[in-house]
């Protein structure tokens, strides 16, 4: 049988998916133990035990300086910024993307400028944001929103404009006005696509968040990682990276579930 | 069929049966220097079932788009009930395309209620409850029963066969009682067996609701089986050096009586239709 035709069953799939992950963990465990035996003060490859201890400390002990639990304060600050930035981007995408996709006049007026904005590397405008909005929350939120919105707007506008012309004709023969057509034909079909492009944009959103926090902040996941980097505290950095990854995975799962539950017709199901 | 009889009354309000409903007056369609249709002049009477045939690229769909209002003629006039058409779609002309005629995000019931809801709720395009919603729902259900989808109210198009989707598209269009129903190769993508069922359905709906239908088809037998009149579009003149110089027009226009329908397509059409 050809290789391309061998499709693993569910159990087998889980098993062979676990193998590379386990391999990485085992290799890490072997090397970190070896280094710890050679030099108990090694910081570059902390053992799982050391990382576990650091993680417990971060997630349970209050920082006497701030009176808060470090990891929780960092997480809530970062998630708030992320939610605001992503929320603003999503809302503006919904309005702009649908308007661009449905109304040719809007597309003619705003399409080119959005294309231009989309090619500007967002990090390059971060200094402008800091100067214009200050070093506080607004500039970080703005970076996230500006970083992901142009792609999302273009993706959604393209999707809406690409809906079969027959649908728009049919809606009009059924008496739909421009507004009704937007609300009942374009909007519902835009929503699952919006969630899809949001899922893809979450990666860049995290990048912009962590960059902004690394440069100017006093709390946040990105701030913490870049702060402890000075002391080579890999035992804090690695659990933080794992924690960020876990948050990212959970967000993605939540969005995927939302889309499946809310828009069954878009996922080949319906009953 | 419960909804059948009262709908006939609705459709027939615009004029006496047999009166002219659609009128083409020297209509031309050109794209740049490409002439697609030229000198199309004909009248379509209320209650006719017009089959439109012709080779690929002859402008059959263009002809239909003109009636639909999806585009306007370059020259000439098209009158519906004596009033010149504006190039914009409206509910007095219903349509079923070969594909993409139904909304994938709405159930069968939602698809048929769409037209009723647009008329009833300008702001939301949706009826959220109450007596008006119940009435619209009942009307939609009757229409779905009429096309044989009474047991599939809550099914999404993606879960339907091609034939069911076209039945749904018909119900969706007919619930608005259009003056003219336009069909562009509505059965082109269906299996032969399903196609026969659909012929029966469309023929039946046409009779019961007193519809006026213009149907484009590639199947010449279908054209003669269903139509009361067959139009064939083709170019009258050819310029071998400039193929775009002349457009197509109705080169064959025959009203069929029962005998002609049973006899089927004449030999002279064999060259026109691919
Ligand atoms: N918007 C347009 N711009 C330029 N040419 C067009 C346009 N729309 C249609 N045409 C041309 O007009 C001609 C007629 O097209 P039309 O779709 O009406 O043909 P048809 O008879 O329906 O063909 P088919 O049987 O393949 O569906 C074709 O040559 C097509 O290329
Ligand atoms: Mg065509």
Image (cartoon, rainbow, N blue to C red):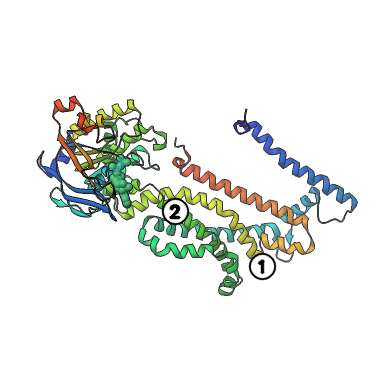
Question: Could you say which disc has been placed on residue A158 in the image?
Answer: 2
**x, y percentage for residue B204?**
22, 30
Q: Disc 2, ligand 1: is the CB inside 8 Å?
A: no
Q: In the rendered view of the protein, which quadrant contains the N terminus of chain A?
A: top right
Q: In terms of image quadrants, where is residue B129? A: top left
Quadrant for the C terminus of chain A, please.
top left
Label 2 resides on the chain identified as A
Residue depicted at x 78% and y 59%? A233
Vertical order, A28 against B205 (above or below): below
Q: Can residue B2 be seen by looking at this rendering?
A: no
Nearer-the-camera pick, B8 or A53: B8
Residue A227 vertical placement versus A159 (above, below): below
Label 1 SS: helix
Give the side of residue A181 with respect to residue A71, left or right: left
Q: Nearer the viewer, mark 2 or mark 1?
A: 2
Relative to A54, does residue A8 appear above or below in the rendering?
A: above
- Closer to the camera, A47 or B225? B225
Query: Where does residue B244 sit, x and y in percent of width and height?
Result: 28, 50
Few, some or many C-alpha atoms within 10 Å of disc 1 (few <14, some 14-19, many ≥20)? Answer: few
Residue behind mark 1 = A215
Give the residue displayed 30% in from the left and 40% down from the top. B56
Q: Are marks 2 and 1 on the same chain?
A: yes
- Is the C-beta separation of discs 2 and 1 under 8 Å? no
Which disc is residue A12 wearing? none
- Give how far apart the Cα atoms at labels 2 and 1 are: 35 Å
Q: Percent position (x, y) of residue A161?
A: 40, 52
Task: Please name the residue shown 35% across and 34% down the image.
Answer: B189
Q: Assign a secondary structure to mark 2.
A: helix
Q: Which sits in the foreground, A76 or B122? A: B122
Mark 2 neighbour density, 10 Å: few (under 14) some (14–19) many (20 or more): some
Q: Residue B173 at x, y = what percent?
A: 27, 41
């Amino acid at each position: 049988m050809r290789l391309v035709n061998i499709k693993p069953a569910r159990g087998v799939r889980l098993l062979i998916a676990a193998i590379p992950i386990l391999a990485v963990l085992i290799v890490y465990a072997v090397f970190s133990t070896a280094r710890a035996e050679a030099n108990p003060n090694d910081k570059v490859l902390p053992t799982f035990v050391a990382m576990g201890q650091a993680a417990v400390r971060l997630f349970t002990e209050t920082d006497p300086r701030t009176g808060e639990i470090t990891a929780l304060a960092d997480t809530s600050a970062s998630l708030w910024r992320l939610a605001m930035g992503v929320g603003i981007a999503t809302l503006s995408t919904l309005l702009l993307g649908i308007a661009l996709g449905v109304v040719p006049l809007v597309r003619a007026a705003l399409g080119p400028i959005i294309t231009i904005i989309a090619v500007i590397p967002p990090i390059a405008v971060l200094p402008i944001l800091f100067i214009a909005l200050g070093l506080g929350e607004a500039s970080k939120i703005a970076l996230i929103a500006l970083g992901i919105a142009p792609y999302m707007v273009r993706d959604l506008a393209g999707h809406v404009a690409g809906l079969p012309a027959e649908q728009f004709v049919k809606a009009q023969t059924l008496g739909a006005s421009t507004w009704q057509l937007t609300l009942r034909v374009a909007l519902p079909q835009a929503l699952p696509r919006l969630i899809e492009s949001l899922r893809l944009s979450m990666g860049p959103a995290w990048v912009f968040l962590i960059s902004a926090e690394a440069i100017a902040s006093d709390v946040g996941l990105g701030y913490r990682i870049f702060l402890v980097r000075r002391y080579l505290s890999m035992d804090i950095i690695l659990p933080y990276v794992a924690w960020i990854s876990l948050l990212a995975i959970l967000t993605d799962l939540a969005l995927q579930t939302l889309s499946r539950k809310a828009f069954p017709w878009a996922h080949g199901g319906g009953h | 069929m419960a909804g059948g009889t009262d709908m006939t009354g609705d459709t027939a309000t615009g004029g006496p049966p047999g009166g002219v409903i659609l009128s083409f007056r020297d209509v031309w369609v050109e794209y740049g220097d490409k002439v697609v249709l030229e000198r199309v002049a004909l009248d379509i009477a209320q209650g006719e079932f017009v089959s439109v045939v012709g080779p690929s690229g002859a402008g059959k769909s263009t002809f239909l788009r003109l009636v639909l209002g999806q585009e306007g003629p370059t020259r000439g006039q098209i009158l519906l009930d004596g009033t010149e058409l504006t190039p914009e779609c409206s509910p007095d002309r219903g349509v079923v395309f070969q594909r993409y005629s139904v909304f994938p995000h709405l159930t069968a019931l939602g698809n048929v209620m769409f037209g009723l809801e647009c008329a009833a709720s300008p702001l939301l395009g949706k009826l959220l409850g109450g007596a008006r919603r119940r009435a619209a729902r009942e009307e939609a259900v009757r229409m779905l029963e009429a096309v044989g989808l009474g047991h599939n109210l809550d099914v999404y198009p993606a879960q339907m066969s091609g034939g069911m989707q076209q039945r749904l598209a018909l119900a969706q269009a007919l619930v608005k009682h259009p003056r003219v129903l336009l069909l562009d190769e509505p059965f082109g993508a269906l299996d032969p067996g399903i196609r026969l069922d659909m012929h029966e359905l469309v023929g039946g709906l046409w009779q019961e609701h007193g519809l006026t239908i213009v149907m484009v088809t590639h199947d010449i037998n279908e054209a003669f089986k269903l139509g009361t009149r067959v139009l064939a579009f083709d170019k009258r003149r050819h310029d071998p050096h400039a193929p775009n110089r002349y457009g197509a027009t109705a080169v064959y226009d025959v009203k069929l009586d029962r005998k002609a329908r049973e006899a089927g397509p004449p030999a002279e059409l064999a060259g026109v239709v691919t």
